[in-house]
Image (cartoon, coloured by chain):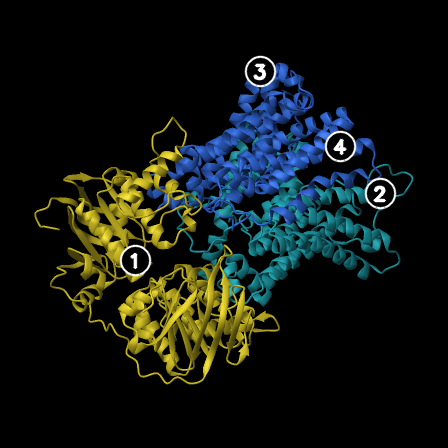
Chain colours: A yellow, B cyan, C blue
Amino acid sequence: MSDNDAPIVLEAKGITKQFPGVLANDKVSLTLRRGEILALLGENGAGKSTLMNILYGLYHPDQGEIWIKGEQVTLHSPGDAIARGVGMVHQHFQLVPVMTVAENVILGAEPAGSGLHLNRREANQRVRGLSQQYGLSIDPTVEVEDLPVGLQQRVEIIKALYRNADILILDEPTAVLTPQEANELFRIMHDLTERGVSIIFITHKLKEVLAVSDRIAVLRGGRVAGTADPKTSTEASLAELMVGRKVILQVDKDEARPAAPVLTITDMQVRDDRKHLAVKSLSLEVHAGEILGVAGVQGNGQREFVEALTGLRAMEAGQVIIAGEDATGKLPRYITELDVAHIPEDREKHGLVMGYTIADNLVLNRYYHSPFSRRAVLDRDEIAENAAQLVKQFDVRTPSIYTHASSLSGGNKQKVIVAREFSRPVKLLIANQPTRGIDVGSIEFIHNQIVAQRDAGVAVLLVSAELDEILSLSDRVAVMFDGRIVKTLPIEEATRERVGLLMAGSEA
Amino acid sequence: MTTASAPGNRGNGARWLRQIWRGISVPLVAVLLAGLIGAVLLQISGANPLQAYGALFKGAFGSPEAIQRTLEKATPLIFSGLAVAFAFKAGLFNIGAQGQLLIGAIVAAFVGFSIEGLPAIIHAPLALLIGGLAGALYGAIPGALKTYTGAHEVIVTIMLNYIAINITDYLADGPWKDPSPTNIVARTPRIMPSAELPIFGNIPLGFIFALVAAVVVWWVLYRTTLGYEIRTVGLNSSAAQYAGIRVARTIILAMAISGFLAGLGGAVETQGIVFRYQPGFNAGLGFDGITTALLGKTSPFGVIPAALLLGAMRAGASQMQFDAGVAKEITDVITAFILFFVAADVIVKWLIRQRESDDEQVVLSKGWGG
Amino acid sequence: MELTAPTTRSAATGWVFKNKWLLLIGAIVVGAIVYAYATNDRVTVAVLASTLRQSTPLILGALCGLIGERSGVVNIGIEGQMLLAAFVAFLANVYIGNLWIALIIGALTGALMGALLAFMAVTLKMDQIIGGTVINILAVGLTGYFYTAGLVTKGKFAPISLGPLADIPLIGPVLFNNPPITYLAIILVFAVHYVLFHTRWGLRTRAVGEHPRAADTVGINVFRTRYINVILAGAIAGLGGAFLTLEGVGSFERLMTNGRGFLALAIMIFGKWTPLGAWAGALLFGFLYALNTQLQFSGVGLPPQLIGSLPYLATILVLAGFVGRSRAPAASGQPYETEG
């Protein structure tokens, strides 16, 4: 549907943006034509989000020009961008959880009613209308926090359409979706372009880029590393353009040599924060020396499952045996003491104390042990020595062991957690989303560490929403859907298609 | 986190001096600016600022007795400031230091007047300890209610402040009332001489205890596993749970320790200054603990200069009122502006062209959510 | 909270179902009042009228607090805002001699303090607990420094009888024969409720308090929204302060707010950041105060100080027993950082 004669609707010329310590955008230029899907590809930290936030008026460029529909513009705020038809679906949804869908949609552009009064009925009608028009099936009266993420994303799209956006920026929209849901999104995107909407689609997933885009621009280190035509590109060529060197897309590992079971879970049931049953009946077994990957779309009970397993959340029913000990309903410390390492899903919430130094973070669940403390008195020298050694061994890039965790990059934060968890004897490793949102270098490093643990005889339970990560690391794949493990497959039988279908709830 | 978070930073002398300057430059400039604003206010209300400040200084530091007065005024503030700061480290806002201090004060008075024949070496510390423990118990209540029922500690401590006033009023006018025939007011009997805290030269023993308390609080917070647990809970209770720390127990314990410090403050006031419990004599000392803790940036060692500054202004205020005819509340106005400039350090740093420090600040207000 | 209520229920029965405890308590309260009135009408009217009077400064303070927090600014300076407004309104009454002008000046004083809080919290991004504390100390200092004993006012607001409404038994003398600030407080409860939950401004305010970045991304000016809300809230606290000197006591005393600003904060949390909930809390508190006076007056066997603890003890029990964990606006207390 794109053709190179369509008028240019948006153009960035020589955009430069400097943050303290980083040049996020360095003379970036790109164009977007009417009715096309432009994929903006780049790894985390390449400057994609910065550029989009500039086009949406959230950041202000230090240098460069923005042209929208043939007119040079200065965007002081998102309001300016919205007024010119730019809409954005943020990677982290910008929705108020305690408000309804309709309230979120109309926020800031409420329908003109009788004076100050908020016309909820009209708002609901307009949202229902948009939802039907684009086949989005959204109930306007539901509170956003009750919606699954996939539907929350559609609320974001409706928000933009409600504001008559004809230039849509989608920032990593598929990160939270199943392959099937992603396909549905791609259908919606194509519908939109047919109606004259132009889309910038930001991602780091190569397959998607090749599947949906009309044109590809690759960003690396804040610069445009090149542009590509999806018809003539391959995953490997795009990956090289994106990272700047040849990338091995497959993790190199030997055959697993599984031994006795280390973790056995039978019929686990767990409730979520809203008291709904999130894990309905979960049974699985992980053996020493193997990696069991749990695939599944976010929000199918993985978080509650892992939290219950590690003692962070109460269990409703079921039994957990770790290394022969009954660990059902035990406190986190008891479970840690069974030589269980846990890389938590949310590293900033559970994994690290941002206000602590790296040194203090590195003893977070061992501070009460010798040599870090004796008779309840901390030994600062031992803590410092431990930190110095681990920072070196795990290649944490930091000016000092006394740097606060908050000032590290995502990848280095994750390395601190990995260093802490791997620096003691481990029988069972529970890794939940271990590489979410970090750079390729750190991903490779952490993947290799996980495989090394497996080879050393550790039982590894890997939970990830990234199908690629599951498929490249696991020895067996368990698919989680709606609070259950619906199928466990040996890696040889776990094809993308089959796992994808299972993740969407259809039996394969 | 402003102190002691970097124990390995042992640089050379010049760097050390620069660190000290970094630490004191902002408060120093804040005091000067606040003083300037106070002077303007004095001038427009018809007073002579120089004369007033001169009298204030004389009243606070002009003689050994003045210095003693300053130390006496600073002592309870150090304790209540430490109490509030300690709770902040655990992520708790203890508005209830006032109530805990009153309970500590009256219980220490009771131990002080009701037991006869103990040697001073036992009686005085016993009264202090039991006063402190009473405060601890009173402080543990909001901690326990928070962890077991979710009742917010801010509401509960506010309510407990009022209840403490009522309890102490009742005791001082009822069962523990001074029975001597000359007494017509609500107050307890005078404590035994053996329960009094002595003064060495012009330095009250209570002040020395306060300094020791600050060192102990620092040590507990930064050198013990308990302190590590408390600070972890305060900075990130989810991570604390992950680390296997029992968050509920830690919160109750932190509130109890905070209450213990406040209770000690009350006991020291009773045994060193008032020598009995009399309603109204400790008014506001606990609330001033909030000011002291904030002024000291919630660090145990920051609390000491903050309390000395506030104590000096209080000690000098009567002299100023007497010599210059200036109402003593001007010192409150100055205090408000000192706190303002210390907290708004962006303004001060811009004024003295100092670049932003990379210290991690403790976030005090996190909303009341839970 | 019923989480499993079927969604098929109609709106009306759904409301009844959701609020069944509230309705039950309401019915008991009404029943008790009618019974009390039948037994002793004079005392009942006195207690209820006193309840309303006692609750007025508290609800005004609580409204101030919740408007601020709904927009994301924690205000522990209500006490200071009320104290200074009480003092300035008092001075205006003394020197100008017009109660209405004094009332407006009191509200403006509160608004000015609100502006100071907004400046500290929004512009300087100062810690909001410190900002509120600055206001509290400043108010104590300024009122103490400029206070001179022996100033005489030209009276205080008298009750305004609302004609025939005031003649209804029980309800009339309690509700329709009050001085102006008491009426104003009741009107403000409903006005703030309407504005917060049924207007554009309210929607935007709540969005700013819950998720300022989301509000920013749809073009809402977070700073401006917070400034306006905190200033208006300050004016309401100012009315609460003016109540004390223009309607309640009629003169000024040092520290006369006596912790009402902090109580208001507690009532705000108690009412879960809603005007109607806060009003219920303020009335409960006012009622316990009034009851307390009545109990001391009628000489129950207990010492007065212990009866005096009743309202506070009851608050703790209600909070621990029934209210439990409460959820503050998510962004309350956090300065908003625009990026880039």
SS for callout 3: loop
Q: Which label sits in the foreground, 1 or 2?
A: 1
- The first of marks 4 and 3 along the sequence is 3
Amino acid tagged 3: Ile
Return the residue at label 4: C293
Return the residue at label 3: C96
SS for callout 2: loop
**Same chain assignment for discs 1 and 2:** no
Task: Answer left or right for B106 relative to A230.
Answer: right
Quick check: marks 1 and 4 in contact, CB under 8 Å? no
Task: Answer left or right for B37 relative to A467.
Answer: right
Return the residue at label 2: B174
3D distance between C-alphas at marks 1 and 3: 71 Å
3D distance between C-alphas at marks 3 and 2: 47 Å
- How crowded pointer 2 is (Cα within 10 Å; few <14, some 14-19, many 20+) is rated as some
Amino acid tagged 4: Thr
The subunit letter for the residue under badge 4 reads C
3D distance between C-alphas at marks 2 and 4: 20 Å
| Up/down of B39 relative to A48, above or below | above
Quadrant in which the C terminus of chain A is drawn? bottom left
The subunit letter for the residue under badge 1 reads A
Return the residue at label 1: A181
SS for callout 4: helix
- How crowded pointer 1 is (Cα within 10 Å; few <14, some 14-19, many 20+) is rated as some
Q: Quadrant of residue C60?
A: top right
